[in-house]
Structure formats: C-alpha cells, structure tokens
Amino acid sequence: MKAHVLQVLAHVPDPEVPCLSVVDLGIVRDVTADAVVITPTYTGCPATLVIEQSIRAELDRAGYAHLGIKTVLSPPWTTDWISDEGHEKLRAFGIAPPHHSAREEDAICPRCTSTHTEMISRFGSTPCKALHRCLACGEPFDKFKCH
C-alpha cells in the first residue's frame, strides 16, 4: 500500500514550485496504515493548507479516503529531503537546487552550469528561494535555499 500511495502523491504538485511533487520535495515523510505523514517546508508556510487539501483530494480519488493526514514538525523539514529526481526537476525548471556549500550565496546556474554567479536578493519569488544572476550567461534565476 505504501508504495502505491507514494505513487499517487507523486502527482500532487507543490503549489509554489509546481515542477516538484510533494514526494519529490520530501514533504511526504511516511505512509502508515492510517495516515500520510507530512512536514511543511517551514512553520507558517503559506502553501501548507493548499498542500494538505491537494493531498486529501488525491487520496480520496485513489480510494484512500480512510487515510488521515498527520502533520509532524519535528524533526523540521530540510532540503536534504528533496529527492535526486527533485534536484533534476528544479534544474530543468530553471531553479538552482540547494547545495550545502560553505556559503549560501554560492549557486550553480541552472541554464549554463557556471559557478560564476551572484546573489541579487536573499528573497526570491517565494520565501524558500533567493534571487541570483549568472555572470557568465547573464540570466537571473532562483536558488532553492538550504534549510
């Protein structure tokens, strides 16, 4: 059952980063006999309610109406939980995936793969991203912040 539920939820996009599913993002932590366990990317994330509603709708459609949704905040979500496929999807979408370098400002351009980049703003299109610019190709891009 767990594998099938994860397959079902792999079709639920994150509302702020729609190239990723809630499974790619690591928001879905576990599936038990009676619940889907989720952890929001951060406490107070404005997309949490939409994510829960989307998960509920997809579970109901797939015949899993008996499963509850349990939100767990500890341990807190970390970008380490983003799947390898999620990293590739972010790059393909034009968002630099997080990497745990010594400096948060460091980013690899998702378009040309240059490391010659600069942070323009700590705040990007959503609270979980920062705005960067590639100094090689000149393109702006978001970088997913490490948490």
Image (tube, rainbow, N blue to C red):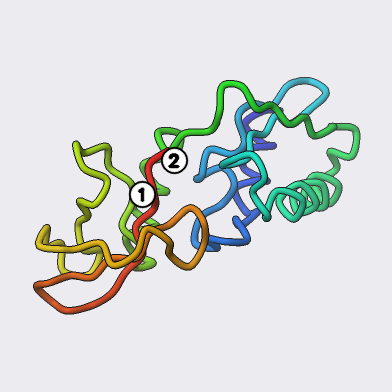
Task: Find residue 127 and report its horizontal and vertical position in percent.
Answer: 51, 56
Q: Quadrant of the C terminus?
A: top left
- Residue type, mark 2 in image: Ile
SS label for mark 1: helix
- Labelled disc at residue 50: none
* Along the viewing direction, whichever of 76 and 119 lies nearer the viewer: 119
At horizontal 23% and vertical 77% (from top left) the residue drawn is 139
Q: How far apart are marks 2 and 1 (CA)?
A: 7 Å
Q: Quadrant of the N terminus?
A: top right
Is residue 74 rendered to the left or right of residue 25? Answer: right
At horizontal 42% and vertical 40% (from top left) the residue drawn is 83
- Residue type, mark 1 in image: His
Q: Answer with mark 2 or mark 1, whichever residue precedes in sequence.
A: 2
Task: Find residue 2 and report its horizontal and vertical position in percent.
Answer: 67, 28
Residue at the spot of label 2: 82
Task: Find residue 64 and report its horizontal and vertical position in percent.
Answer: 84, 38
Question: How many neighbours does mark 1 have within 10 angstroms: few (below 14), some (14-19), or many (20 or more)?
Answer: many
Q: In which quarter of the image is residue 29?
A: top right
At horizontal 11% and vertical 58% (from top left) the residue drawn is 115
CB atoms of marks 2 and 1 within 8 Å: yes
Task: Find residue 90 and report its horizontal and vertical position in percent.
Answer: 38, 58
Is residue 142 rendered to the left or right of residue 22? Answer: left
Q: In which quarter of the image is residue 70?
A: top right
Residue at the spot of label 1: 87
